[in-house]
Image: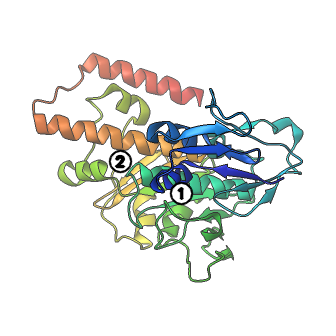
Amino acid sequence: MAKIILTDVDIENIAAQGKTSLIIEENMLLTDLAYEKAGRLGIELLQYNLHHIPTEPVQIHLDKTETYQTSFSKPYNLSSMPKSIERTYTSRDILQFNDFSSEQQLRDAIILTGRILYHSGLMVSNDGNISVRLSNGNILITPSGVTKGRISAEDLLVIDLDGQIIKAAENPNLKATSEQPMHIEIYRQRPDVRAVIHTHLIFANAMAISMGKIRMDVIPEAAIAFGEIPITEFALPSSPQNATAIRGLIKNHDVVLIRNHGSLAVGKNLDEALIKTERLEHISKTLTFAELLGDVNALPADMLDAIQGIVQKNNKLL
Protein backbone atom coordinates (compact mmCIF):
# COMPACT_ATOMS: atom_id res chain seq x y z
CA MET A 1 0.00 0.00 0.00
CA ALA A 2 1.39 3.42 -0.97
CA LYS A 3 2.11 5.72 1.95
CA ILE A 4 0.69 9.26 2.09
CA ILE A 5 3.02 11.76 3.76
CA LEU A 6 1.35 14.82 5.26
CA THR A 7 3.31 18.03 5.80
CA ASP A 8 2.70 21.12 7.92
CA VAL A 9 0.96 22.76 4.95
CA ASP A 10 -1.50 19.87 4.77
CA ILE A 11 -2.27 20.35 8.47
CA GLU A 12 -2.88 24.07 7.86
CA ASN A 13 -5.31 23.20 5.07
CA ILE A 14 -7.16 20.81 7.38
CA ALA A 15 -7.43 23.52 10.03
CA ALA A 16 -8.65 26.02 7.42
CA GLN A 17 -11.52 23.63 6.66
CA GLY A 18 -12.65 23.95 10.28
CA LYS A 19 -11.63 20.43 11.25
CA THR A 20 -10.32 19.84 14.77
CA SER A 21 -9.14 16.25 14.46
CA LEU A 22 -7.45 13.93 12.00
CA ILE A 23 -7.46 10.14 12.00
CA ILE A 24 -4.01 8.82 11.07
CA GLU A 25 -4.83 5.79 8.96
CA GLU A 26 -2.45 2.92 8.27
CA ASN A 27 -1.15 4.45 5.03
CA MET A 28 -0.72 7.99 6.43
CA LEU A 29 2.49 9.40 7.90
CA LEU A 30 3.28 12.86 9.28
CA THR A 31 6.51 14.82 9.10
CA ASP A 32 7.90 16.35 12.28
CA LEU A 33 6.77 19.79 11.12
CA ALA A 34 3.24 18.49 10.50
CA TYR A 35 3.06 17.02 13.99
CA GLU A 36 4.27 20.29 15.53
CA LYS A 37 1.81 22.31 13.43
CA ALA A 38 -1.07 20.10 14.56
CA GLY A 39 -0.14 20.78 18.17
CA ARG A 40 -0.01 24.54 17.62
CA LEU A 41 -3.32 24.62 15.74
CA GLY A 42 -5.10 22.31 18.16
CA ILE A 43 -5.66 19.53 15.63
CA GLU A 44 -6.25 16.29 17.55
CA LEU A 45 -4.36 13.38 15.98
CA LEU A 46 -6.10 10.03 16.35
CA GLN A 47 -4.32 6.82 15.45
CA TYR A 48 -6.06 4.36 13.17
CA ASN A 49 -8.16 1.86 15.18
CA LEU A 50 -6.71 3.12 18.47
CA HIS A 51 -8.40 6.54 18.57
CA HIS A 52 -6.05 8.21 20.98
CA ILE A 53 -3.55 11.02 20.67
CA PRO A 54 -0.07 9.74 19.79
CA THR A 55 2.48 10.34 22.52
CA GLU A 56 5.27 10.79 19.96
CA PRO A 57 5.48 12.21 16.43
CA VAL A 58 4.41 9.81 13.71
CA GLN A 59 7.72 9.22 11.95
CA ILE A 60 8.26 8.42 8.29
CA HIS A 61 9.94 5.02 8.05
CA LEU A 62 11.59 4.04 4.81
CA ASP A 63 11.00 0.44 3.90
CA LYS A 64 13.09 -0.45 0.89
CA THR A 65 10.32 -2.60 -0.58
CA GLU A 66 7.55 0.01 -0.52
CA THR A 67 6.50 2.87 -2.77
CA TYR A 68 5.84 6.20 -1.06
CA GLN A 69 3.56 9.03 -2.07
CA THR A 70 4.60 12.41 -0.73
CA SER A 71 2.39 15.46 -0.80
CA PHE A 72 5.11 17.10 -2.90
CA SER A 73 5.23 14.80 -5.87
CA LYS A 74 4.32 11.60 -7.65
CA PRO A 75 5.16 8.19 -6.12
CA TYR A 76 8.75 7.03 -6.22
CA ASN A 77 10.15 3.59 -5.55
CA LEU A 78 12.72 2.96 -2.85
CA SER A 79 13.51 -0.64 -3.77
CA SER A 80 17.01 0.30 -4.93
CA MET A 81 17.93 2.02 -1.66
CA PRO A 82 20.93 0.34 0.04
CA LYS A 83 19.85 -1.53 3.14
CA SER A 84 22.60 0.18 5.14
CA ILE A 85 20.77 3.50 5.03
CA GLU A 86 17.29 2.16 5.72
CA ARG A 87 16.11 4.09 8.79
CA THR A 88 13.54 6.41 10.27
CA TYR A 89 13.01 9.28 7.83
CA THR A 90 12.14 12.70 9.28
CA SER A 91 11.86 16.20 7.85
CA ARG A 92 15.44 16.85 8.98
CA ASP A 93 16.59 13.82 7.00
CA ILE A 94 14.87 15.20 3.91
CA LEU A 95 16.99 18.35 4.15
CA GLN A 96 20.21 16.58 5.18
CA PHE A 97 20.55 14.62 1.96
CA ASN A 98 23.71 12.77 0.98
CA ASP A 99 25.36 10.97 -1.91
CA PHE A 100 22.83 8.13 -1.66
CA SER A 101 19.83 10.45 -2.03
CA SER A 102 17.83 10.06 -5.22
CA GLU A 103 16.80 12.94 -7.46
CA GLN A 104 13.24 12.55 -6.20
CA GLN A 105 14.39 12.94 -2.61
CA LEU A 106 16.32 16.08 -3.57
CA ARG A 107 13.18 17.42 -5.24
CA ASP A 108 11.29 16.82 -2.00
CA ALA A 109 14.07 18.57 -0.08
CA ILE A 110 13.72 21.70 -2.22
CA ILE A 111 9.94 21.72 -1.86
CA LEU A 112 10.16 21.34 1.92
CA THR A 113 12.76 24.12 2.09
CA GLY A 114 10.54 26.41 0.04
CA ARG A 115 7.61 25.79 2.37
CA ILE A 116 9.70 26.41 5.48
CA LEU A 117 11.08 29.67 4.07
CA TYR A 118 7.68 30.82 2.84
CA HIS A 119 5.81 30.11 6.06
CA SER A 120 8.63 31.68 8.09
CA GLY A 121 8.31 34.89 6.09
CA LEU A 122 11.87 34.53 4.80
CA MET A 123 10.84 34.04 1.16
CA VAL A 124 7.69 35.91 0.16
CA SER A 125 5.68 36.31 -3.02
CA ASN A 126 7.62 34.92 -6.00
CA ASP A 127 10.96 36.05 -4.56
CA GLY A 128 14.05 33.94 -4.09
CA ASN A 129 15.26 30.66 -5.49
CA ILE A 130 16.66 27.34 -4.30
CA SER A 131 18.94 24.79 -5.93
CA VAL A 132 20.87 21.62 -5.18
CA ARG A 133 23.70 19.87 -6.99
CA LEU A 134 22.78 16.40 -8.21
CA SER A 135 25.23 13.52 -7.87
CA ASN A 136 25.97 13.72 -11.62
CA GLY A 137 26.98 17.40 -11.35
CA ASN A 138 23.83 18.88 -12.84
CA ILE A 139 21.72 21.39 -10.92
CA LEU A 140 18.14 20.94 -9.73
CA ILE A 141 16.63 24.41 -9.46
CA THR A 142 13.36 26.22 -8.80
CA PRO A 143 11.41 27.89 -11.61
CA SER A 144 10.96 31.60 -12.19
CA GLY A 145 7.80 33.45 -11.19
CA VAL A 146 6.40 30.82 -8.82
CA THR A 147 5.80 31.14 -5.08
CA LYS A 148 8.22 28.75 -3.41
CA GLY A 149 5.71 27.87 -0.71
CA ARG A 150 3.33 26.38 -3.25
CA ILE A 151 5.44 24.64 -5.87
CA SER A 152 5.50 20.90 -6.51
CA ALA A 153 8.39 18.58 -7.27
CA GLU A 154 7.34 18.45 -10.92
CA ASP A 155 7.82 22.24 -11.20
CA LEU A 156 11.59 21.96 -10.75
CA LEU A 157 14.07 21.90 -13.62
CA VAL A 158 17.45 20.28 -14.15
CA ILE A 159 20.16 22.37 -15.83
CA ASP A 160 23.85 21.80 -16.47
CA LEU A 161 26.75 24.08 -15.57
CA ASP A 162 26.31 25.89 -18.88
CA GLY A 163 22.70 26.73 -18.06
CA GLN A 164 21.26 24.33 -20.62
CA ILE A 165 18.02 22.59 -19.67
CA ILE A 166 18.56 18.87 -19.16
CA LYS A 167 15.09 18.12 -17.81
CA ALA A 168 12.24 20.60 -18.14
CA ALA A 169 9.43 21.14 -15.68
CA GLU A 170 6.24 19.17 -16.23
CA ASN A 171 4.54 22.49 -17.00
CA PRO A 172 6.21 23.69 -20.24
CA ASN A 173 5.52 27.32 -19.30
CA LEU A 174 7.87 27.14 -16.33
CA LYS A 175 11.44 28.29 -16.92
CA ALA A 176 14.48 28.10 -14.67
CA THR A 177 15.01 31.05 -12.36
CA SER A 178 16.62 34.06 -13.99
CA GLU A 179 19.21 33.97 -11.19
CA GLN A 180 20.64 30.68 -12.45
CA PRO A 181 24.00 32.28 -13.46
CA MET A 182 24.58 33.06 -9.79
CA HIS A 183 23.86 29.47 -8.75
CA ILE A 184 26.10 28.12 -11.51
CA GLU A 185 28.94 30.41 -10.41
CA ILE A 186 28.72 29.05 -6.87
CA TYR A 187 28.78 25.40 -7.93
CA ARG A 188 31.72 26.05 -10.23
CA GLN A 189 33.75 27.67 -7.46
CA ARG A 190 32.67 25.50 -4.54
CA PRO A 191 32.89 21.73 -5.09
CA ASP A 192 31.99 21.31 -1.40
CA VAL A 193 28.62 23.02 -1.86
CA ARG A 194 25.51 21.04 -2.79
CA ALA A 195 22.80 23.54 -1.82
CA VAL A 196 22.14 27.23 -2.48
CA ILE A 197 19.40 29.47 -1.07
CA HIS A 198 18.88 33.00 -2.40
CA THR A 199 16.44 35.19 -0.46
CA HIS A 200 15.40 38.83 -0.12
CA LEU A 201 15.56 39.01 3.68
CA ILE A 202 13.98 42.11 5.21
CA PHE A 203 16.33 42.88 8.09
CA ALA A 204 19.54 41.68 6.45
CA ASN A 205 18.75 43.79 3.40
CA ALA A 206 17.84 46.79 5.53
CA MET A 207 21.11 46.57 7.46
CA ALA A 208 23.12 46.30 4.26
CA ILE A 209 21.27 49.19 2.59
CA SER A 210 21.40 51.61 5.51
CA MET A 211 24.75 50.73 7.09
CA GLY A 212 26.67 49.06 4.28
CA LYS A 213 27.54 46.13 6.54
CA ILE A 214 26.34 43.76 9.23
CA ARG A 215 28.40 44.24 12.38
CA MET A 216 30.24 41.22 13.71
CA ASP A 217 31.49 42.91 16.89
CA VAL A 218 28.22 42.89 18.84
CA ILE A 219 26.77 39.37 18.96
CA PRO A 220 29.25 36.56 19.75
CA GLU A 221 27.23 33.95 17.85
CA ALA A 222 27.38 36.09 14.71
CA ALA A 223 31.15 36.33 14.79
CA ILE A 224 31.52 32.61 15.51
CA ALA A 225 29.04 31.52 12.84
CA PHE A 226 30.10 33.84 10.03
CA GLY A 227 33.42 35.51 10.85
CA GLU A 228 32.33 38.24 8.48
CA ILE A 229 29.55 38.71 5.94
CA PRO A 230 30.82 40.42 2.78
CA ILE A 231 28.63 42.62 0.62
CA THR A 232 28.93 42.75 -3.16
CA GLU A 233 28.91 45.78 -5.39
CA PHE A 234 25.50 46.56 -6.84
CA ALA A 235 24.52 44.32 -9.74
CA LEU A 236 21.38 44.32 -11.84
CA PRO A 237 18.99 41.66 -10.47
CA SER A 238 18.24 38.68 -12.72
CA SER A 239 21.32 39.33 -14.81
CA PRO A 240 24.74 37.69 -15.28
CA GLN A 241 26.15 40.67 -13.35
CA ASN A 242 25.16 38.95 -10.12
CA ALA A 243 27.45 36.03 -10.91
CA THR A 244 30.28 38.48 -11.50
CA ALA A 245 29.48 40.37 -8.29
CA ILE A 246 29.76 37.31 -6.05
CA ARG A 247 32.75 35.78 -7.84
CA GLY A 248 35.43 37.17 -5.55
CA LEU A 249 33.46 36.55 -2.35
CA ILE A 250 31.61 33.24 -2.44
CA LYS A 251 34.79 31.17 -2.67
CA ASN A 252 35.67 31.88 0.96
CA HIS A 253 32.28 32.71 2.49
CA ASP A 254 29.13 30.67 3.00
CA VAL A 255 26.92 33.75 3.36
CA VAL A 256 27.10 36.79 1.08
CA LEU A 257 24.89 39.87 0.85
CA ILE A 258 24.09 41.22 -2.61
CA ARG A 259 23.94 44.99 -2.30
CA ASN A 260 20.40 46.43 -2.35
CA HIS A 261 19.09 43.05 -3.45
CA GLY A 262 19.29 40.02 -1.19
CA SER A 263 21.42 37.29 0.31
CA LEU A 264 23.02 33.96 -0.53
CA ALA A 265 23.58 31.05 1.82
CA VAL A 266 25.29 27.82 0.80
CA GLY A 267 25.95 24.47 2.44
CA LYS A 268 26.67 20.82 1.87
CA ASN A 269 22.91 20.27 2.09
CA LEU A 270 19.75 22.34 2.39
CA ASP A 271 19.61 21.99 6.16
CA GLU A 272 22.94 23.84 6.43
CA ALA A 273 21.94 26.54 3.95
CA LEU A 274 18.59 27.01 5.69
CA ILE A 275 20.18 27.35 9.14
CA LYS A 276 22.56 30.01 7.81
CA THR A 277 19.69 31.91 6.20
CA GLU A 278 17.65 31.85 9.40
CA ARG A 279 20.64 32.87 11.51
CA LEU A 280 21.51 35.75 9.18
CA GLU A 281 18.02 37.22 9.46
CA HIS A 282 17.84 36.68 13.23
CA ILE A 283 21.16 38.44 13.79
CA SER A 284 20.17 41.28 11.45
CA LYS A 285 16.85 41.73 13.24
CA THR A 286 18.55 41.86 16.63
CA LEU A 287 21.08 44.43 15.40
CA THR A 288 18.32 46.53 13.83
CA PHE A 289 16.44 46.82 17.12
CA ALA A 290 19.68 47.47 18.99
CA GLU A 291 20.49 50.35 16.64
CA LEU A 292 16.98 51.76 17.09
CA LEU A 293 17.34 51.67 20.87
CA GLY A 294 20.75 53.35 20.61
CA ASP A 295 24.08 52.98 22.44
CA VAL A 296 25.03 49.64 20.91
CA ASN A 297 27.75 48.09 23.04
CA ALA A 298 30.48 46.37 21.07
CA LEU A 299 32.21 43.31 22.47
CA PRO A 300 35.50 43.96 24.29
CA ALA A 301 38.64 43.60 22.19
CA ASP A 302 39.88 40.60 24.19
CA MET A 303 36.53 38.87 23.66
CA LEU A 304 36.77 39.44 19.91
CA ASP A 305 40.29 37.98 19.94
CA ALA A 306 39.00 34.91 21.79
CA ILE A 307 36.16 34.52 19.30
CA GLN A 308 38.61 34.77 16.42
CA GLY A 309 40.56 31.92 18.01
CA ILE A 310 37.39 29.81 18.14
CA VAL A 311 36.67 30.55 14.48
CA GLN A 312 40.18 29.58 13.41
CA LYS A 313 40.01 26.37 15.46
CA ASN A 314 36.65 25.45 13.93
CA ASN A 315 37.96 26.10 10.42
CA LYS A 316 40.86 23.71 11.02
CA LEU A 317 38.40 21.00 12.05
CA LEU A 318 36.36 21.32 8.85
User: Of the numbered discs in the image, which one, if any, rests on residue 186?
Assistant: 1
Viewer-side residue, 11 vs 68: 11
The quadrant the C terminus occupies is top right
Q: How is the image coloured?
A: rainbow
The residue that mark 2 highlights is 230
Secondary structure at numbered mark 2: loop
Viewer-side residue, 189 vs 146: 146
Image coordinates of residue 313 in percent, x first then y, are 50, 23
Which of disc 2 and disc 1 is earlier in sequence?
1
Q: CA distance from mark 1 to mark 2?
A: 15 Å
Q: Mark 2 packing: few (<14 Cα in 10 Å), some, or many (20+)?
A: many
Secondary structure at numbered mark 1: helix
Residue drawn at (51%, 56%), measured in percent from left and top?
A: 13
Q: Is residue 129 visible?
A: yes
Establish if 136 lies above or below 218: below
Q: Is residue 308 left or right of residue 76?
A: left
Residue lying furthest left: 294
Establish if 148 lies above or below 81: below
Residue drawn at (65%, 55%), measured in percent from left and top?
A: 108
Establish if 291 lies above or below 302: below
Q: Is residue 141 left or right of residue 47?
A: left
Q: Is residue 30 visible?
A: no
Q: Mark 1 packing: few (<14 Cα in 10 Å), some, or many (20+)?
A: many
What's under tag 2, amino acid-wise? Pro
Viewer-side residue, 248 vs 274: 274
